[in-house]
Amino acid sequence: LQMLTPTFSIDQDDNLLTITIEAKYANVGETEIEYSDLDFVFSSSPYFLRLHLPSPVIEDETGSAKYDSDRGAFVVTVPKKNKGQRFEGLDMITQLLRPQKASARPLVEEIGVEEGEGGSDEEEDQLDTVGDELLLDQTAHEGKEESALDEESKEYGYGFGWRRRGVLERLKDEIGKLIDIDDAENTKIDERKIKSALRDRKKFNGEHYLADTFDPDDMLDEILRWKMEKNEKSEITQEDKERMKELPNKKLPVLTSEETYAVSLSLVDILFAYAYDQRVNMGDSSVESSWTYNTLSPSLSSLTRWRNVKEGVQAATRRAVVYPLYRNWTLVEKVFDDLKEILKRGRSSIVHCLCVMHHGLAIGGDFRYLLNELILTDLLVWVQSVDGGVLERLEKEIREIKLTKSSTGLDLDTLEMGAKLSMMRMNGEGREADSDDE
């Protein structure tokens, strides 16, 4: 029953959707295409695609389908039921592959089974229903639904929605310093950000910071001049679509409004880490990118949870002058501006950034792929479907934040003032020595 999910893209105009399906090994003669209301189904061995559209379509004489043999692709035009309506989220690949929340039907139904008989778990996992049609499950690696939030997880949980327990304990001998808090498994959620901040202050190197502040090298000057607007596109790429297509088809835990807000706040430092990496690499990724993501984001490295945007910004900016190669406040300000631009560009921009991070962590080594399993995979699925108002609120709150050096808790202003006074004294002594020589 297992078939391949083809890569696809969807364009639209006022009246039609144009769905392009890449299926170069398809058996064209046995292709079936059906669509109605919110459902679109394509089947051409060995490919199967079922899309759950955000708005209704109809089957009439304006629809068409053709096979482009040169490209190995099917191009299907699908009429919109309501002409002129704009379909939202057509680049949210994972969401299109999952049944919509509005459906009241169970995702798996027993067909023709008497009460008490039942089928095997494996058979049930492979079947899905849309209307009266029995369809193949198009995801090869379906995940399991997260358990409800228990009392222990409320205090000690981690991962997406802070619902995971036991993973770090089982892998503690293998994962090394992936998590920078000792015994994170048994550290309360609210204590992690405190321990993380204390560790940052202990690790801070004033001499390194002052060197990058008063004597930046040529590369840092070039990094500061880099413009994200000219180098970083917000559109979802073909690579992003491939990654979203392969995400597990799992039910995310049902979050309260407070939990939803907390999850959105984790985007602050996670995307800040991405923006820092993009700027220092001037629009590219490097072999060190996964280290940067993990190190600069306390949500990843310390499994923190924020109460508000200010907390997330303070932690991210503090770590940016403690751990990476370049530790410069002007760089921090530039990265923060990049973060604001990413959020301003909206959902597609955020999804693109998370896809890049997901790929980097998957191949980065040092067990960083576990951060995908714990947080990034679910966060990437969640961002595609969360109410737009959640992301708009985050963007607004970030836009209103004013960065200050004092918020890092590292006393940077005093440190810089002391360095300036020392340089003035040295310059004065130098001038006096020159006068004596004359």
Image (spheres, helix red, strand yellow):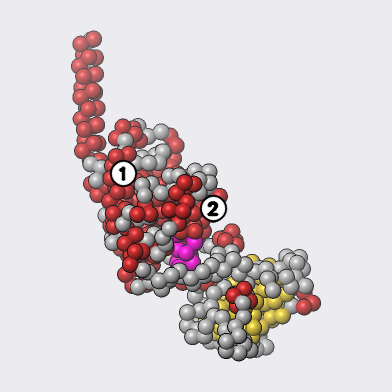
Which corner quadrant of the image does residue 259 belong to? bottom left
Task: Report whether residue 378 is seen.
Answer: yes
Q: What main secondary structure does the magenta stretch of the protein show? A: helix
Asked if the magenta segment contains residue 377, the reply would be: yes
Q: Is residue 12 left or right of residue 28?
A: left
- Label 2 with label 1: CB-CB less than 8 Å: no
Q: Residue at x 22, y 27 (%)?
A: 422
Q: Residue at x 59, y 72 (%)?
A: 10
Residue 192 coordinates in the image, percent (x, y): 31, 53
**Disc 2 and disc 1: Cα gap in Å?**
26 Å
Task: Please state the horizontal and vertical placement of residue 364, each as a whole percent of the image.
Answer: 53, 47
Tell me the quarter of the image containing the N terminus: bottom right
Q: Is residue 429 left or right of residue 364?
A: left
Looking at the image, the residue that sits furthest to the front is 116
Whether residue 336 can be seen here: no
Which residue is labeled 2 in the image? 362
Side of 314 relative to 141 (left or right) = left
Residue 219: image quadrant is: top left
In the image, is residue 91 above or below residue 240? below
Region in magenta: 375-384
| Tag 2 secondary structure | helix
Would you say residue 218 sits in the magenta stretch? no
Q: Amino acid at mark 1?
A: Arg
Q: Tell me where residue 65 appears, x and y as whole percent.
A: 70, 78
Residue at 70%, 76% in the rendered image? 43
Q: Quadrant of the C terminus?
A: top left
Tag of residue 199: 1
Q: How many marks?
A: 2
